[in-house]
Amino acid sequence: MKVDLFDFDLPDESIALRPADPRDSARMLVVGRNVGLEDRNVFDLAKLLRAGDALVFNDTKVIPAQLHGIRSRGENKCAVDATLHMRVAADRWRAFMRPAKRLAVGDRIAFGHSADTCMIGALDATVVEKGEAGEVELAFDLAGAFLDEALHTVGHIPLPPYIASKRPEDARDRSDYQTIYADQEGAVAAPTAGLHFTPQLMAALDEAGISRHFVTLHVGAGTFLPVKADDTADHKMHAEIGLVTEDVAASLNAVRARGGRIVSVGTTSLRLLESAADADGSIQPWQGPTDIFITPGYRFRAVDILMTNFHLPRSTLFMLVSAFAGFQTMHDAYAHAISDSYRFYSYGDSSLLFRNDDQGVLA
């Protein structure tokens, strides 16, 4: 499919730079619930679902994965930036580097210091592999918990480019860019649909008889990468590491058997559940990488309802929601959201999408 099909014009003022306060006061556009488009708020979620439904959250925790450092090659030094995106060993991460063309295998990098400061105490790494599109593999001098502690000391929260280009990271982002249920460290981007949840909303969902379940998908920096190919068939998704436990798989299959619906909080939870589902929709335990790429024409097996924020033009996530709720439906929904001043992207408003199985590839 041509990537141009997923383009749309988005005014710069539609991009949210801070989340709603309180979080669950954000607006929520309901799409496909036999009512066309319906303007609601996130705190209405319990009223829009029904007893016996199951919410599936991604409990990954964002780490300070943005690093600034100095590359050394003999007496030759230059400043470099790294965004870690996948851990491959206790001491190794894959990362997107800038400027990657200034790096070679064997280069040493001292992170946490600028060119005019002392290198003592810096977090050091070696470039052990170079890939495509600015990707490298870094072997750090520290490993395990010691490396984790160092990242928290010298790293920065990797705000999405569309926010970082407008303002610097600050202390608020350390809490704002984290869900209230974040538990498993490893993500370099937040599962942003979950940023809207508050203890009060969780209590309302409990009272309504809607169960909650947790999976883990460590969101990588690849989620920020634009689709540069002209055709979706030529786009490569970066893999992300996920986990669906036996207990969660069994619980979700029991929900479906009782007639309940699986409600994915975010595209990350959805991509993991669809990766773990059999052809008949049964969810199996899962552990490992997934690079599933969902475009119109995909037939969903596990997820009935999707709660998600508003995504970038030409992005893999806008392709995913177009597959889920319908190509023209989502173009119409986004046109409505733009004209009605919904806030877009990571800190923006939400949508609640009901799955449309009665669609052709571009229905």
Image: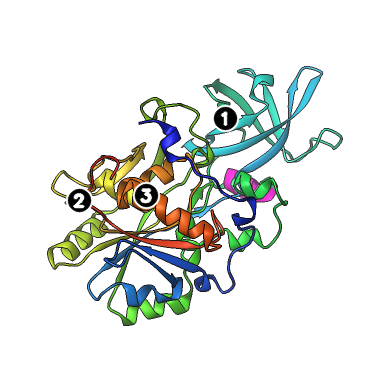
**Residue 29 placed where, x, y %?**
42, 64
Left or right: residue 281 compared with residue 101: left
Tag 3 near tag 1, CB within 8 Å: no
Left or right: residue 81 compared with residue 231: right
- Which mark, residue 139? 1
| Mark nearer the viewer, 2 or 1 | 2
Left or right: residue 236 compared with residue 206: right
| Mark nearer the viewer, 2 or 3 | 2
Counting residues from the start of the chain, the first of labels 2 and 1 encountered is 1
Q: Amino acid at mark 1?
A: Ala
**Residue 145 placed where, x, y %?**
55, 47
Residue visible at 31% across and 44% down in the picture: 287
Assess disc 3: are there few (<14), some (14-19) or many (≥20) residues with their C-alpha within 10 Å of its C-alpha: many
Q: Is residue 23 visible?
A: yes
**Residue 238 placed where, x, y %?**
44, 34
Q: CA distance from mark 2 to mark 1?
A: 49 Å
Tag 2 near tag 3, CB within 8 Å: no
Of 263 and 282, the residue lying toward us? 263
In the picture of the structure, the residue carrying the numbered disc 3 is 321
- Secondary structure under badge 2? loop
Assess disc 1: are there few (<14), some (14-19) or many (≥20) residues with their C-alpha within 10 Å of its C-alpha: many
Q: How is the image coloured?
A: rainbow
226 falls in the magenta region: no
Quadrant, the N terminus: top left
Counting residues from the start of the chain, the first of labels 2 and 3 encountered is 3
Residue 339, compared with residue 200, is above or below; it is above
- Magenta portion: prevailing SS class: helix
**Magenta range:** 147-153
Left or right: residue 190 compared with residue 165: left
**Residue 140 placed where, x, y %?**
60, 33
Q: Amino acid at mark 3?
A: Val
In the picture of the structure, the residue carrying the numbered disc 2 is 358
